[in-house]
């Protein structure tokens, strides 16, 4: 299991960040997520695996700076 | 510890007014030439029109200077203000001060915001703003003692030059055992010997038992301070509570403050972790999106960028509470304990480094081709101690390094320094030279605009290529974001009133990453609303981080997620609760619009403020060199063929660069048209008489100024 935005979610071998976001069916265009303490950005979503037991945070980065 | 002396030259005892609904309703005036201390009331119409903070600064400055006034004339005023909400300890991010003056690098109005305790202490001592004119031949310390209701001017000697030691000594000197009651504003030798000096504003860190500081960095405000003969301005206050601002509706204030504070505590750990790592998370995020400036903004990405990322600084930062104002739950002002510099006067000694933040990491790291966090920390430490702006230092040295690599300058000009990108010791040596006003550093400390002139005139360098790669606009060095692929952010920088600083508009993610604003009109709308709302923080004495760097979980489901309207409404409630003036989100925008347009007109008065002054170097718009083009050839080729319908068959890289440049520059001009129209300005970028009237800034001298510039009723 992994925890995504505070909710439990099933984990599977080889699951990428893109897979995870697809499964969420959340229309928000996330550009950054954090897996535990590791920041992952959209250009890396497709080839970044989510480890089992990870805690995933969806970062709503929009107009900061 | 230095042997130092204080000689009291002027004293004014006064009766401190109660702060009511966030205002003291008077300002403090000091003239250093013919020493004078005066207290001036704030007219009700000034309060209604300019709100406070930056608005008050600009009004004081407007009345202090003439169109002919230059930054180093005695009549130039240095103004510092808090704002009506400033000093509230229960609402996150409520301790900002705003500094405004005529800038040595732009010649026009500069404003710079900063944390630390000074602004709130100034206000609670009885003054909404401080205005300092004149010059002293001797070093002066101004002491604003709100506790004992006394203003004192001291001639001093023997005090250290650098802000690191000076802040500690003056805190101890004035504290009488209560260092938390003291906030010191000081510059440093770099501010005196360059045009890019910053100001250091202290806050006392009781856990670490030391004066820490934040910087008002931009546009040489520290240089003006040093030129006036100011050694320091010190404020003393005690007893800060939710009642100190005497809010109109304390219950309402507590309700909204609790909501925002709790949200930050709950969501920051799930989002950007600013309470642990500050703004360092941005380094790798920007890098991955090709937005982290490297090698003088040539590229937005580098394989070694993670060396400067949050993983490293998470380990380097000394854990603990790091709020630059009391009670702030964002608490992002981190620092490095027991850091040992490799160069300079502190070589081999343990020091505390306040920082670095993202801008310093990108400016003094990646943009110089330096990917060593230790060097960045050392640059950060010395820039602060010397009173130098890390952004202008970074962008300035980046320009020098590219000129060196292009062969525009050589070791003959640099005094033998090898200034290839990545030369850590060369960069540090330049910082030490800037502080001393010696060697090639003395030239670099003049800023990019003047360097371009010197390199062309004295060294025979090609002015055209320097115009393309010298990252300044209006005379101010760019802050540290890549804008080539975001037209909206090109406007965010180029159309900013004071020059290219991101505090007006940071639209890169909205525009480039999310593509939320595909049309020119949408970009123009964003370049209206965001600068206006961001300006409002500076009117009120607030930090903008709690607004949109910690975001409600349901924000993504709102109509306009980029504006984070839930927080905007909270800020409107906060303003209403403190001042008693009921305000909604649109009212906040109107407050800002008034001050924003007044500042644009102020620029016009100083000989700026037209379309031509909103130009930006081509490096900010597109690829200047063949290397830049070829490194992202697929992207640029695609834009030429698909967006601009250009047949690129048979074209070489130089031809493609020229064609792309023509189209991109046309887009930027079209953006200007759209933004000016949206802001109620003429096609030449000047507010119309109708706009001035609508906003209540149609004073006689404003109307005359507009008419003199061809803008008639």
Image (cartoon, grey):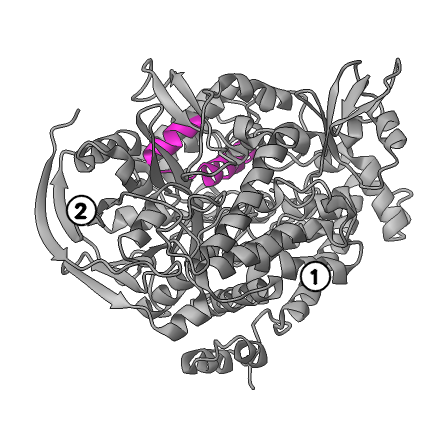
Majority SS type along the magenta span? helix
Residue B627 position within the rendered picture, expressed as x and y whole percent measured from the top left: 71, 33
Structural crowding at the residue carrying mark 1, measured as other residues with C-alpha within 10 Å and reported as few (<14), some (14–19) or many (≥20): many
- Say which chain tag 1 marks: B
Residue B199 is inside the magenta segment: no
Of mark 1 and mark 2, the one earlier in the sequence is: 2
Residue B528 position within the rendered picture, expressed as x and y whole percent measured from the top left: 64, 62
The residue singled out by tag 1 in the image is B524
State which quarter of the image contains the C terminus of chain B. Answer: bottom right
Is B43 rendered above or below residue A20?
A: below
Closer-to-camera residue (B341/B172): B172
Query: Relative to residue B89, is residue B461 drawn left or right?
Result: right
Q: Secondary structure at mark 2?
A: strand
The residue singled out by tag 2 in the image is B140
- Residue A49 figure quarter: top right
- Say which chain tag 2 marks: B
Question: Mark 1 and mark 2, same subunit?
Answer: yes
Q: Secondary structure at mark 1?
A: helix
Is B36 rendered above or below residue A44?
A: below
Measure how far apart labels 1 and 2 are at the Cα level: 46 Å
Closer-to-camera residue (B193/B416): B193
- Residue B337 figure quarter: top left
Query: In this orientation, does residue B233 appear?
Result: yes
Query: Relative to residue B604, is residue B178 drawn left or right?
Result: left
Closer-to-camera residue (B57/B550): B550
- Name the residue located 44 percent from the left edge and 30 percent from the top edge: B322
Query: In this orientation, does residue B495 appear?
Result: no
Q: Residue furthest front?
A: B251
Q: Which residues are magenta?
A: B379-404
Residue B394 position within the rendered picture, expressed as x and y whole percent measured from the top left: 49, 35
């Amino acid at each position: 299991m992994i925890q995504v935005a505070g909710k439990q979610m099933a984990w599977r071998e080889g699951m990428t960040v893109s897979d995870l976001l697809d499964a969420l069916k959340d229309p928000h265009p996330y550009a950054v997520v954090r897996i535990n303490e590791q920041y992952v950005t959209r250009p890396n979503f497709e080839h970044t695996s989510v480890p089992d037991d990870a805690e995933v945070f969806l970062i709503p980065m929009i107009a900061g700076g | 510890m230095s042997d130092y002396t204080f000689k009291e030259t002027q004293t004014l005892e006064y009766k401190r007014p109660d702060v009511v609904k966030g205002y003291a309703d008077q300002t403090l005036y000091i003239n250093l030439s013919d020493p004078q201390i005066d207290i001036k009331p704030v007219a009700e119409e000034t309060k209604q029109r300019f709100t406070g903070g930056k608005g008050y600064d600009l009004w004081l400055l407007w009345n202090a200077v003439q169109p002919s006034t230059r930054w180093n004339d005695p009549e130039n005023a240095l103004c510092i203000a808090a704002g009506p909400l400033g000093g509230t300890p229960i609402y996150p991010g409520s301790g900002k001060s705003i500094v405004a003056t005529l800038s040595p690098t732009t010649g026009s109005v500069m404003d710079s915001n900063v944390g630390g305790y000074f602004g709130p202490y100034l206000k609670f001592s009885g003054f909404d703003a401080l205005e300092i004119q004149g010059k002293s031949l001797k070093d002066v310390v101004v002491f604003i003692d709100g506790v004992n209701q006394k203003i004192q001017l001291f001639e001093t000697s023997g005090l250290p030059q650098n802000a690191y030691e000076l802040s500690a000594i003056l805190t101890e000197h004035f504290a009488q055992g209560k260092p938390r009651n003291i906030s010191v504003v000081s510059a440093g030798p770099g501010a005196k010997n360059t045009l890019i000096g910053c100001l250091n504003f202290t806050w006392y860190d009781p856990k670490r038992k030391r004066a820490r500081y934040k910087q008002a960095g931009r546009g040489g405000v520290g240089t003006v301070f040093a030129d006036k003969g100011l050694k320091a301005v010190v404020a003393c206050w005690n007893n800060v509570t939710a009642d100190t601002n005497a809010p109109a509706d304390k219950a309402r204030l507590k309700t909204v403050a609790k909501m925002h504070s709790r949200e930050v505590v709950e969501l920051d750990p799930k989002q950007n972790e600013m309470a642990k790592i500050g703004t360092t998370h941005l380094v790798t995020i920007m890098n991955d999106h090709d937005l982290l400036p490297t090698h003088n903004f040539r590229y937005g990405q580098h394989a070694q960028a993670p060396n400067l990322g949050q993983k490293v600084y998470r380990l380097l930062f000394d854990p603990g509470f790091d709020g630059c104002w009391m009670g702030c739950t964002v608490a992002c002002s981190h620092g490095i304990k027991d850091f040992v510099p490799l160069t300079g006067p502190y070589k081999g000694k343990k020091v505390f480094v306040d920082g670095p933040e993202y801008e310093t990491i990108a400016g003094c790291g990646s943009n110089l081709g330096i990917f060593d966090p230790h060097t960045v920390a050392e640059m950060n430490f010395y820039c602060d101690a010397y009173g130098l702006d890390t952004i202008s230092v970074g962008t300035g040295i980046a320009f020098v390094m590219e000129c060196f690599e292009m062969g525009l300058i050589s070791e003959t000009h640099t005094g033998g320094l090898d200034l290839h990108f990545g030369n850590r010791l060369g960069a540090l040596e330049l910082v030490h030279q800037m502080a001393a006003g010696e060697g090639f550093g003395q030239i670099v400390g003049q800023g990019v605009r003047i360097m371009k002139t010197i390199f062309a005139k004295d060294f025979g360098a090609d002015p055209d290529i320097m115009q393309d790669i010298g990252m300044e606009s209006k005379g101010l060095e760019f802050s540290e974001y890549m804008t080539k692929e975001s037209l909206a952010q090109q406007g965010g920088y180029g159309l900013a009133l004071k020059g290219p600083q991101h505090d007006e508009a940071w639209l890169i993610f909205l525009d480039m990453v999310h593509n939320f604003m595909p049309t020119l009109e949408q970009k123009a709308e964003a370049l209206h609303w965001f600068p206006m709302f961001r300006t409002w923080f500076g009117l009120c004495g607030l930090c903008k981080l709690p607004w949109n760097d910690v975001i409600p979980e349901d924000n993504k489901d709102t109509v306009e997620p980029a504006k984070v309207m839930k927080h905007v409404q909270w800020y409107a409630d906060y303003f209403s609760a403190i001042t008693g003036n009921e305000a909604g989100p649109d009212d906040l925008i109107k407050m800002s619009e008034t001050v924003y347009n007044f500042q644009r007109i102020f620029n016009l008065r100083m000989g700026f403020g037209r379309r031509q002054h909103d130009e930006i170097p081509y490096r900010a718009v597109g690829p200047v060199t063949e290397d830049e083009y070829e490194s992202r050839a697929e992207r640029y080729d695609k834009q030429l063929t698909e967006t601009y319908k250009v047949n690129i068959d048979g074209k070489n890289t130089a031809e493609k660069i020229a064609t792309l440049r023509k189209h991109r520059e046309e887009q930027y001009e079209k953006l200007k048209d759209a933004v000016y129209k949206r802001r109620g300005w003429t096609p030449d970028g000047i507010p119309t008489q109708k706009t001035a009237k609508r906003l209540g800034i149609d004073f006689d001298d404003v109307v005359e100024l507009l008419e003199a510039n061809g803008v008639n009723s």
